[in-house]
Image: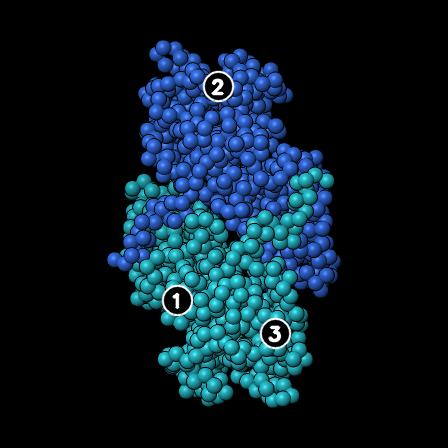
Chain colours: A blue, B cyan
Amino acid sequence: MSTLTEQLLKTEAHNALFETEVRKLPLPTCSAFGPTSAPQPVSFAATAQKLVTRDSAAVAESFPNSVKASDNIVLAAAGTNANAAQGKRVAVLFSGGPASGGHNVVCGLKRILGKGNTLLGVKPGPKGLIKGNLFEITDADIDTIINTGGFDFLGTDRTKIKTDEQFQQVKDTCVKHNLDAIVVIGGDDSNTNAAVLAEYLFKGVKSDGSGVQVIGVPKTIDGDLQIEGLLPISFGFDTATKIYSEMVGNILQDTRSSLKYWHFIKLMGRSASHVTLEVGLQTKPAITLISEEVAAQKMSLATIVDNIAQTVVLRAKKGITHGVVLVPEGLIEFIPEMNTLLAELNDALAHHADEFATQAEANRAGFIQGKLSADNAHLFASLPAYIVKMLLADRDSHGNLQVSLIPTELLLIDMVRARVKEIDASVPFGSQNHFFGYEGRCGAPTLFDAAYTYNLGLTAGSLILDGRTGYMASVTDLTRGGMPKAIPLAGLLNIERRHGKDEFVIEKALVKMDSPAMGYFVDRRAAWAADDLFASPGPRQLWGPAALQQPISVALNSGSDSLAFKIGA
Amino acid sequence: MSTLTEQLLKTEAHNALFETEVRKLPLPTCSAFGPTSAPQPVSFAATAQKLVTRDSAAVAESFPNSVKASDNIVLAAAGTNANAAQGKRVAVLFSGGPASGGHNVVCGLKRILGKGNTLLGVKPGPKGLIKGNLFEITDADIDTIINTGGFDFLGTDRTKIKTDEQFQQVKDTCVKHNLDAIVVIGGDDSNTNAAVLAEYLFKGVKSDGSGVQVIGVPKTIDGDLQIEGLLPISFGFDTATKIYSEMVGNILQDTRSSLKYWHFIKLMGRSASHVTLEVGLQTKPAITLISEEVAAQKMSLATIVDNIAQTVVLRAKKGITHGVVLVPEGLIEFIPEMNTLLAELNDALAHHADEFATQAEANRAGFIQGKLSADNAHLFASLPAYIVKMLLADRDSHGNLQVSLIPTELLLIDMVRARVKEIDASVPFGSQNHFFGYEGRCGAPTLFDAAYTYNLGLTAGSLILDGRTGYMASVTDLTRGGMPKAIPLAGLLNIERRHGKDEFVIEKALVKMDSPAMGYFVDRRAAWAADDLFASPGPRQLWGPAALQQPISVALNSGSDSLAFKIGA
């Protein structure tokens, strides 16, 4: 065997040179935790901030123990915890889609729990908690996973703990494994679930009548879990947007090299356009669509298409026959008239089901079009054949169409092509399409996400050792050293009607039209549409002079004076 | 305006922090060029190596001037060129698809030509040469483009200079701009075109009877322009494969985090599977398909599908219900039976065109199946409906189907799903699909590509100042400091029948079954299929301890004893 093949064998199973080297990267800690080499648990004290939502009163009735204990008041680190608990058994799990930095939350937890407490891993996700599939996490595990991407150490799943039986099973797991606390690393739904669990496990779980603490950690690449002043961003957003931004930047350079294509790029994020806005701010392409703006301005599909087509024509007149259009995954659901059309279509198909079924395939679109109101019939007729076919396809068990299955980027391409031809048939319009999603969820965390999540882990562990339950860990002041905080989960809840019943929810944070990030984008976009002013932010760097960058939208919205972030002294 | 928005404005038009910082990265130079801070042109001397191809005799007849001048003998750098020419006017152009590092070729050229000569840029590509669209490249241009990805500085196109009129137009451009030399940065076809141009422009172009020198530079992300011992790899391959490897590594981590999908990932590279092999070696997924092996072993589609399905079942029995399959873009064309089927199908459709046209849509597949031989009818019947529909669609003007339009990754997913169900219906098979292509062509070059291309530029410029024409620049010994070489283009040519006529071609280098890279892959793949042994090589780094890595396949095939490369002292 040659020297080289010996080296290559050693790179198997997560040991590429990059993976070996990132494990050695130092992680900064908020000064509240004391020396970085030996962080100490902090205690927490009330701040002046009390959380109030629309449905606070109803929530307080359903979460009496949690709300009584927290009074929905935000906590902040208040010095080293001289009375930190010992002997606690803490379980940690991932919930929902993966996001970069999850492993470092586990590392921070393990570090702050120290030798005096035990950290258990749950495999995989909430399902593992129900089944009681737990194991003890060792220091060697931490050395292996630190600074690596993915949730592959524990796995994850999307089970929502909701039936009485499931809650009982979780309680059984707590008893069987003698748990004192559970840390749920997840998004808005998972943190809602953490709030419910915290209330359910508040007391009377174990033989001595004590309860099990539950702490949430804010994860999601979509960035729709953020709270002004309290939670700058969920973890994983920075890494995902930097991965997408590199690829979009590469494609922008390709457009100006090959000189013949418009690339329509769909980006992950169904509910909110934070990802698309951030990637737009990073790369400055000709066109960036923001779902929330489409809804706010009640834009029609035709208007969106016409705006793009006018830009295509404007640029072509200057000799620029290429460009990039960023499309948020959830766009279609934010176009009011599309929702109206889909609703009437669902009704019409249900109403005329028998007659519809007897129609020859070629006549079906015409038949159903005749049953629609004038506006909807007009919109329906304007859609490409493959979309119409999709709209007439079988419904789900609730009689609804899965809007997310509509290939928005292809729909836009076809409609823009037709509209460009109408405006000026001499304008060329070559197209390509992409969808960037899975590529961004499990990459090695940026230095921002790596440091942020490690400190979220230190914060979550400190909350447990301080005897707290029903909080979400947070770290604020990310350009001023970082401040560990705790957000009372019940204080975030509202009530929403879903599937015909009231449910507690943490409302998703959407892009605000009056936010500084949106404002900056709106100021610049006409210039970016008129000429190639794009930037190519390159692959995220873990070493060197370009490594320390927070998301642009977070920097703008938090009033930072630079893109640099700073955790620790 | 805030401090931050001022900073953001400055990042527009290729000034992201990363772009600003990569421009400052130092570039090493082969010791032949003297001091790195002030590289000097080298002269070239004959080596002992003479190139002989199957068709050398015929080529010598068609390229009398070139072959007489070079005798098809490889040249190597032979010390500083004390008699380097002065006052030369040199044009440079990109040809074909973009590849990372092209800008650094231009930078190397400009640097070595120095103040005594003039470098002109051609916009865009061969079309720009025909049209005579040239401009002088300044030092400020070089400072802007150095170490950045893409071909956007000059643009590129795919025009093949072949008609008498086009050759005359190129000659006119040479006269009009008083050119002494042209540097063509391109792939196999473009370098063939360079060879033809070199012969055509050998003499008698300008009023004094002198000719115009032509030098080729080996570019292509596909890696199918490589010559054992003479040309380790074309530029752009390293950057593209490292971009794809990061994304495949991220997705591999996602598979083990989400625990529910098989991802089928198609990778760019129609003719050769070098890209797929390299990404497989970097990331070690469950399955990596190599087109050349499929052809060599005359594998049927059913065999390929069965192999994948057996692996899916094998892993599922161990509880691993996820994985990644890498699929080279050109796979279908390497499956012998698919070519046979397509040929018979083309014949049958042409033969029975009138009768076929009268069939109802639903009967067409059955009708044409009845016209096929038994084997082909059987294969045809086994294909999913949307593939059949595609195979029956309109032919191009030559009566051929564009095989590349077949979505190979979807075809494999559907057939694997069916086969898994046959083997064991209890085995789950969730799937996702991706195609990574454009993302990899225009990224910022790796340190390998950045250094390699800068030295290719220094070599190409040195060849011009040494009075050479009809050579391709190369740099060998990339782990031992680097050695500038010159490969006689005519010595690479063979004759191939294309579109019914004989054409000169540089044959594409395919993956060799007996190469060390393929051998290593074959040794390890059963282990990678049986268990998750993947690695996640991460985003390419331009700084820090993980930055200096050549491609694994190049290192293996060149007998390197490590992945590190070394250009300069």
Rendered view: B44 above or below A271: below
The three-letter code of the residue at mark 2 reads Ser
Closer to the camera in the image, A50 or A81? A81
Q: Which residue is mark 3?
A: B117
Looking at the image, the residue that sits furthest to the left is A1
Badge 3 and badge 2 in a common chain: no
Name which residue lies at 46% across and 59% down: B448
Q: Who comes first in sequence, dot 3 or dot 1? A: 3
Which quadrant would the C terminus of chain B be assigned to in this image? bottom left
- Where residue A364 appears, as percent x and y from the top left, is 60, 49
Residue A43 marker: 2
Q: Quadrant of residue A548?
A: top right
**Number of the front mark, 3 or 1:** 3
The quadrant in which residue B145 appears is: bottom right
Q: Is residue B528 visible?
A: yes
Report x, y in % for residue B444: 53, 56
CA distance for labels 3 and 1: 29 Å
Which residue in the structure is indicated by mark 1? B477
Residue B112 horizontal side relative to residue B228, left or right: right
Amino acid on which the number 3 mark rests in the picture: Asn
Query: Which type of secondary structure does the marked residue at label 1 adopt?
Result: loop
Q: How many C-alpha atoms fall within 10 Å of the one at disc 2: few (<14), some, or many (≥20)?
A: many
Real-space CA distance between mark 3 and mark 2, rounded to the nearest whole angstrom: 71 Å
Q: Chain of mark 3?
A: B
Please state the horizontal and vertical placement of residue B174, each as a whole percent of the image. 63, 80
Left or right: A328 with respect to A305? left
